[in-house]
Amino acid sequence: MSQESSPAAPANFIKNIIEADLAAGKHAQRRWGGKPGPAADHAGAPLDTAKIRTRFPPEPNGYLHFGHAKSILLNFGLAEHYGGRCHLRFDDTNPEKEEQEYVDSIIESVRWLGCSWQSGGENNLYYASDYFDEMAAFADYLIAAGHAYVDSQTAEDMRANRGTLTQPGRDSPFRNRSVADNQELFRRMKAGEFADGAHVLRARIDMAAPNINLRDPAIYRIRHATHHNTGDQWRVYPMYTFAHPIEDALECITHSICTLEFEDQRPFYDWLLERLAEGGLVQRPLPQQIEFSRLNLTYIVLSKRKLIQLVDEKHVDSWDDPRMPTLAGARRRGYAPAGFRLFAERIGVSKTDSLIDYSRFEDAQREVMNETDERRVAVLDPLKLIIDNYPAGQVEQCLAPNHPQHPERGQRPLPFSRELWIEAEDFQETPAKGFHRLTPGSRARLRYGYVVECTGCDKDDSGKVIAVHCHYLPETKSGTPGADSVKVQGNLHWLSAAHAYAAEVRLFDRLFTVPAPGARREGDAPDLERDFLADINPASKTRITAQLEPSLQNAQPEQRFQFERHGYFAADRRDSQPGRPVFNRVVTLRDSWQGKGN
Ligand code: ATP
Ligand code: MG
């Protein structure tokens, strides 16, 4: 993460906040008891060796998507940069929606991005549900201190009395219950004596507060539900807005970074932690919530609800379908974690909402892959090229560099023989204007091999070209003296037909045909509502049988290469068999989308 090194480093206002805090020594006196806990657990402990603590707090109710990658790289990146730690915390306080499958995939994706919650001799992987005891104890404290009460209004009355943006709310008739009554009622709520919704525990703040979130927000509700971690132990569950600040405080988080929609919650976040700190329950200085704008990208959707719909309704094959904007999908497709990092650095962090063009993500990926990936040859749409003056049965080796900018990565032999595969589009019997490859009478170089002169073609009964004929010029072998003496315009890739092997290759295109799937478009009737599913690209996946250079047979799952002239391709991590890799096209060499369909 070297933003400083790049001349056009984008703004990251959060760095400014952290640097000011570090300069002021704001967190220098913080203690860390080795694991999360209330103030008393940290009080006698040594000073925290972590300069800052951040966290990534996913709710395990779905797979992570590209937007989460921004948050992960930001939080782990800041911790790394400033000598701090970043915690991975499963925000699993909601009993209904969480599943182990999601926990596992989140762990895998965070690791895949190269982020670690194990650093400085610590293992900072936490589950918010492990804090239920502390949360309930803190609620008891708030009741005792007069800061919380049990409300027994119906949900309807509660809603009606909440007021609006322009009108203050009205106090609940239960707002002035005695502390003893509140304690007794909350005890009975916890004991499971009441039905769901019969009572809620609310913070007592101000029903006339201009910010609706401060009008006595609910902090505990009754839910007779089994929780994946705590089973049937609890009959009440904390509200997210109550749980989250407490999780941060117990973990001694210094900078609690979240997306902009939580901005209106910040006053309650601060109110709650102030009250708990007054009671000596959480350590000062308190964590600071900082909001940034979420990532939005064109041509994809980034909402768990929509992603679930794509999977459930079988518009894609699975959560890790290479077309899905999930991190599991990105990994399977073959995108590079370093490409995510480069992209995240480039877009920066701000408070302004923006829609970023998907091609910027692809460009970052290409830039990384161009540097890291070895080159190989693949013929995706094979057509026979017969060299009539090359001896049948003869084979010679041509040397192809593994990376043109890195000679130290060596070369590999490519067998050359009389019958080759070339791309069908590299031959035109009647050349279109500007066509510079093979056409009767033209010369082209077979990359790493010889210059050939096209002599004609064979056709089947329907007139389709089934083979191209040529002569080779023996003095022109690449790497030999005088090889360049013959002028050519085209430069083609090829494979020896007897040595290449046929393999399945999957070509992916964008999953949606429009930049903002489901959004209204210019000229739409006022009452027209669009469905993002109607914008799905029906041709987002094509399977072909391609001819690949022999060495690719040994590609390991997830290994990625640049197929010359085509793009970047990775061996599928699920469908590849030993000796029989199946390749996914990650991205083409250049952005080809603009020209589509024209
Ligand atoms: P979604 O809105 O897609 O359902 P979420 O916010 O409910 O996502 P969480 O599991 O609660 O998903 O998110 C974990 C963290 O990831 C949160 O801190 C959240 O702010 C952040 N996050 C989610 N979506 C984005 C995004 N598009 N860009 C940046 N950060 C995001
Ligand atoms: Mg959420």
Image: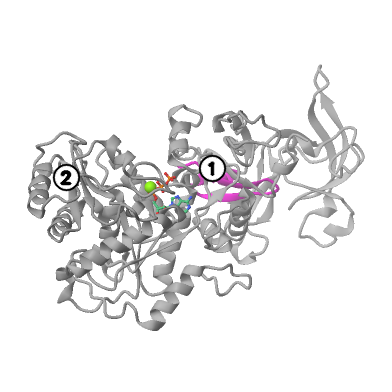
| Dot in front, 1 or 2 | 2
Amino acid found under the numbered disc labelled 1: Gln
Q: Does the magenta stretch include residue 519?
A: no
Image coordinates for residue 47, horizontal then vertical, percent: 24, 79
Of 388 and 169, which appears nearest the observer? 169
Helix, strand or loop at mark 2 = loop
Tell me how many marks there are.
Answer: 2
Mark 2 and ligand 1: say if the CB distance to the nearest ligand atom is below 8 Å.
Answer: no
User: Does 14 sit above or below residue 226?
Assistant: below
Task: Give the camera-side residue of 365 and 549.
Answer: 365
**Image check: 436 left or right of 322?**
right
Is 117 displayed left or right of 23 in the figure? left
Residue at 52%, 56% in the rendered image: 340
Query: How far apart are the alpha carbons under marks 1 and 2?
Result: 49 Å
Q: Mark 1 points at which residue?
A: 553
Give the residue drawn at x 30%, y 47%.
Answer: 170
The crowding category of the residue bearing disc 1, from other C-alpha atoms within 10 Å (few below 14, some 14 to 19, many at least 20), is some
Going 85% across and 30% down the picture, which residue do you hit?
457
Start-end of magenta stretch: 550-573
Q: Whole-percent x and y of residue 492?
A: 77, 46
Are there few (<14), some (14-19), or many (20+) residues within 10 Å of tag 2? few
**Residue 291 place in picture, x, y as percent:** 44, 60
Image-based side of 121 in relation to 261, left or right: left
Residue found at x 20% / y 78%: 46
Q: Is residue 289 visible?
A: yes
The residue identified by callout 2 is: 230
Does 507 sit above or below residue 331? above
Numbered circle sitting on residue 83: none
| In this view, 173 is above or below 350 | above
Residue 24 lies, with reference to residue 288, above or below; the image says: below
Percent position of residue 343, x then y = 56, 58
Which of the two labelled residues, at mark 1 and mark 2, occupies the earlier sequence position?
2
